[in-house]
Amino acid sequence: MPAVSSVLIVGAGVAGTAAAILLAEGGVDVDLIEQKSEVTALGSGITLQGNALRVFRQLGVWPEIERHGYSFTTLGLRAPDAAGSLIVEMPDARTGGPDLPATVGMPRPELARILVERAAEVGARVRFGVRLDGLEQQGETVQATFDDGSTARYDLVIGADGLHSRVREAIGIDVKPQPTGMAIWRVFTPRPASVTRTDLTYGGPCYIAGYCPTGEDSLYAYLVEPADPANFELSGPERVARMRALSEAYHGPWDDIRPYITDDRGVNYTFFEAHVVDGPWNRGRVVIIGDAAHSCPPTLAQGAAQSLEDAAVLAELMLNADELDDGLWQQFTGRRLGRAREVVQASVQLGQWMIDHDQSADVPGLMGRIGALVTEPA
């Protein structure tokens, strides 16, 4: 029997839905709540590396991901010159194994829909527009109070409620994401024929200029520059004008993307942030996973993959143990903390090297080390 029979999962993002799918498939009674009123996701597109795809296959959603996303196996580097010259196209690491693509890009809302529908299909009760108001641990159960005043008891509560986690706060973990000094402009547009993989340009007015195809007819493009709080005060049209102006320094496929950076599409602006909860991620029978436990800037595109790994490891341990005890939590910490910390530190280091304009930085060595790390299953 599983170590638990009833679980509340707070947050229907990547980590929460993945945990719900695996636990419900394993015979656990799962409630999955989300404070948003419907299936949605912030941002435009998402880059999913091979180790994320490996977990999607385990969840039974890989065929849908493959159908609705855009797969590619190489990475391009371009120069910040007048032609956007291609410097090199190189094979990208297939961290999920040789039978999966290196990378898939897809729209975030489509990914959210696929995962929520799969969770409901395997028996999880998914409720939107529900907010957690409080938790009280009572012996071998946890009482949850919801915003409508109702309560329910569970053997385990999983906080998968993101960067600003209410569950993390409720169990007394005072660790919050901190800005890294970089910020990113993102726009979701049609995909011109010239874009068939991610290309990155380092230099020019931005630290990074890049794009990722997310479907036959879509992509998201992004520009990374120093963080400036004043940009949050810009109106929608002003954000569009700012991103278009920055993009003027980049050419090649950027010249095909730029006409689509228009007011009707909108531009998203966010700071890069990072944190790791150092030590056990549980307090008794409440545990945090995903962005609630760790976050990193997208310089290695490992955020979603690490969240998925959290869910997969936690579900594996819960389904294969007879009881929820200290030994199980030690196994979970041992398998996840060091790996997540290394990915976060490497992601932050890549950004810091760019901020410092460090010409001696061993970027290939760092990327190779993390690639080797995540190729091994968590």
Image (cartoon, rainbow, N blue to C red):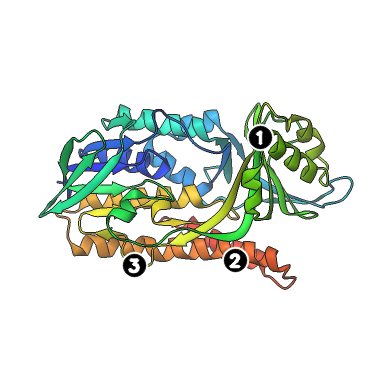
Task: Name the residue at the right extreme.
Answer: 82
Q: Amino acid at mark 1?
A: Gly
Q: Which residue is mark 3?
A: 279
Q: Earlier in the sequence, mark 1 or mark 2?
A: 1
Give the mark, 2 or 3, whose residue is nearer the N terminus: 3
Instruction: Give residue 126's position: percent from left, percent from top.
Output: 30, 31
Q: Is residue 319 visible?
A: no
Q: Residue 196 appears in which quarter of the rendering?
A: top right
Q: Is residue 242 left or right of residue 376?
A: right
Of labels 1 and 3, the one closer to you: 1
**What is the distance, in whole Å, between disc 1 and disc 2 at their CAs?**
32 Å
Relative depth, front residue between 373 and 209: 209
Q: Quadrant of the C terminus?
A: bottom left
Residue at position x 63%, y 67% in the image:
365
Q: Which mark is residue 236?
A: 1
| Residue placed most toward the observer, 232 or 18 | 232
| Residue located beneath label 2 in the image | 349
